[in-house]
Amino acid sequence: MTPEPQGEPTRQQWTTGTGRTPVTPEPQGEPTRQQSTTGTGRTPAAPRTPGRADTPGAPDPHPHPHPLRFGYGTNGLADLRLDDALHLLADLGYDGLGLTLDHMHLDPFAPDIAARTRRTADLLDKLGLEVTVETGARYVLDPRRKHGPSLLDPDPEDRARRVDLLLRAVTIAADLGAHAVHCFSGTLPPGTDPDTAWARLADTLTPVLDAATTAGIPLAVEPEPGHLLATLADFHRLRRALGDPEHLGLTLDIGHCQCLEPLPPADCVRAAAPWLRHVQIEDMCRGVHEHLPLGEGEIDFPEVLGALAATGYRGLTVVELPRHSHAGPYYAELSLPFLRHAAPSPQGSPR
């Protein structure tokens, strides 16, 4: 059993670069689903950030430094009931959360999902929490295949199951007043050539984008190490293939930038600014895909958060530590003061 971390963070934990020995990267892969079945009747609410740009989570069209809004991912609080997780994050002072739809947190396939969504929307409103809907649950579609099936599976019925998940997520997001719906491509299936996989990706995402456009919810695709769509360049390939639709946006994971992008993370933020709809954040080391607690890797957080604030981004910046759920409340408590300390002051300079 993994021991619970104890004590206050060391000085080294609150700076960049710990000299940690690289470990085996975390395996990746992601789900997507279909069909709008919640039917809560709730009018889709605008994200709760005052003065947002017209597209939820979008950078200001006339960028100027903007206070960042921080959240924590429920995939890092998997041992808590959803209501308990929401109360915890509100008590700690978070602005919102990345809500991963999963069997224990707003199961999108539950027969009473409409009622559950209404209750969750009411609690979010009561606690003053914003939300982005995430679709990275490991086994919500298949109890034997992590993040399977994907948008790239050879079997069209399997791809349809992933589309179904995403369509359900769009409906839930609209009923919650979410900033965006997050998704990713999946890994290249064995025996599938890349050109065929890219064509499948564009084809399977089309009905999801149509639903997102109707709901007024951005679809925020995440470049994921090891996936077909792994980099910012890959995101732009998809964007061009789909004709640059207004509601196709980007989930930028800051750790992934450190892991494999050719540009430093702060430069990735600047380059991605026009398409940013959701941001995930954790620490990471170059060339090693392992999500680390803040301060345990190599990322320069004041530089990254300064660049993010300067874009005018008004969505959530969500801590992504799915492998640390065994100590989720501990890391949630540590992460927010870390981020606030590293973020620019209201006057625009680092604290």
Image (cartoon, helix red, strand yellow):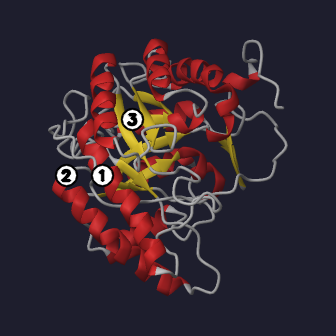
Residues at marks 3 and 1 touching, judged by CB atoms closer than 8 Å: no
Secondary structure type for disc 2: helix
Closer mark to the observer between disc 3 and disc 1 = 1
Q: Earlier in the sequence, mark 2 or mark 3?
A: 2
Residue 298 seen from this side: yes
Residue 16's x, y, as percent?
Answer: 68, 32
Q: In the rendering, which numbered label is found on residue 215?
A: 2
Q: Quadrant of residue 3?
A: top right
Residue 248's x, y, as percent?
Answer: 30, 60
Q: Earlier in the sequence, mark 1 or mark 2?
A: 1
Name the quarter where the N terminus is drawn. Answer: top right
Query: In the shown orientation, is residue 33 left or right of residue 149?
Result: left
Instruction: Please tell me which residue is depicted at 44% across the width and 60% down the height of the picture.
Output: 32
Residue 20's x, y, as percent?
Answer: 82, 38
Q: Amino acid at mark 2?
A: Ala
Q: Name the residue that disc number 1 marks.
A: 170
Q: CA distance from mark 1 to mark 2?
A: 7 Å
Badge 2: residue crowd in 10 Å (few <14, some 14–19, many ≥20): some
